[in-house]
Image: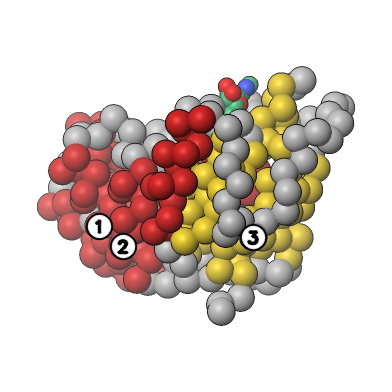
Amino acid sequence: MSPMLLEAEGLCASYGSYRALFGVSLALPEGSVMALLGSNGAGKSTLARVFTGLVASTGGTVRFAGCDITNLPAWRIARMGLVHVPEGRGVFGSLSVEENLVLSFRRRAGRSEVSTALERAYGAFPVLAERRRQQAATLSGGQQRMLSLAKVLAVPPRLLVVDELSLGLAPVIVDAVYDGLVAIRSNGTTLLVVEQQVDRALALADLAVVLAKGAVAWQGPAAGAATAMEGILGTGSVVDAGSRPGQPDSAGQPDRPGRPDSAGQPDSVGTGEGAGEMGRSC
Ligand code: ATP
């Protein structure tokens, strides 16, 4: 079995006095794709933000490539190669597609790498090559989302966390976005896909984790996730999945107030901008 690239153990997180995560544990092997599923408010985005340093954990640990990255600043996590493409678009509307890419690639990979990175980006998202001279603000929502994904391809991240890529997009556009993810994966990037469109995510994923009410309700091979989700969403409660390898959830553990969360940080902090030293060891 591949070594674990990302390991979470007993992760907890809060927004002020509101507890959003209760002892979440999971393990993501290098080279695989994990779908992070669950209904609205289950805690998926919060967990993604804790992994990438955008929200502080109030308990538990996160290890990335063998290093303890718990509560490191987002920019340091991004430099290590764990990059977050959050919900939304994060592109400069007044610049062209290519200007957006070149700006990002120069900052993150250096001038000499720009043409290779452009090739990689246009290979993953051919529609962006067709529209390279077009002002980003005039792209469709789906194309803007592709551009925000392409921007992280300056140096292929070791782990890419994508959040709600399909939100508000027409199915044909979602297909193109997911085709891009397949290309990114084939470049060697491990993926954690936060998604409400279960079928989309499971078609790509090897593994799945289902969150309910801030705790792991089920985890196992992607093939078993749809059935597990029916049980979880049907009853609204955590099911006892035989394949659950993680730690038990710690919903009963006392709250630990007083640790700040960083919910107010801008999403762009975690996108790896300026991460010219990606992949360096801890
Ligand atoms: P969705 O798919 O609707 O985004 P989710 O599974 O990603 O749902 P989160 O966004 O992680 O869920 O939210 C988990 C809980 O934390 C929800 O009850 C949500 O209202 C709450 N929450 C999320 N962000 C904040 C915030 N910045 N401040 C306060 N509470 C928040």
Q: CA distance from mark 3 to mark 2?
A: 27 Å
Q: N-terminal of the two: label 1 or label 3?
A: 1
Q: Are marks 1 and 2 in contact (CB under 8 Å)?
A: yes
Q: Is residue 215 above or below residue 179?
A: above
User: Is the CB of mark 3 within 8 Å of ligand 1?
Assistant: no
Residue 190 % position (x, y): 47, 64
Circle 1 Cα neighbour tier, 10 Å, few/some/many (<14 / 14–19 / ≥20): some
What residue lies at 48% left-to-right and 54% top-to-bottom? 208
Q: Which residue is painted at 26% across and 61% down in the image?
A: 124
Residue bearing the label numbered 3? 245
Circle 3 crowding by C-alpha within 10 Å: few under 14, some 14–19, many from 20: few
Q: Nearer the viewer, residue 75 or 246?
A: 246
Residue position marked by numbered label 1 in the rendering: 179
Label 3 amino acid? Pro
Number of marks in the rendered image: 3
Quarter of the figure with the N terminus: bottom right
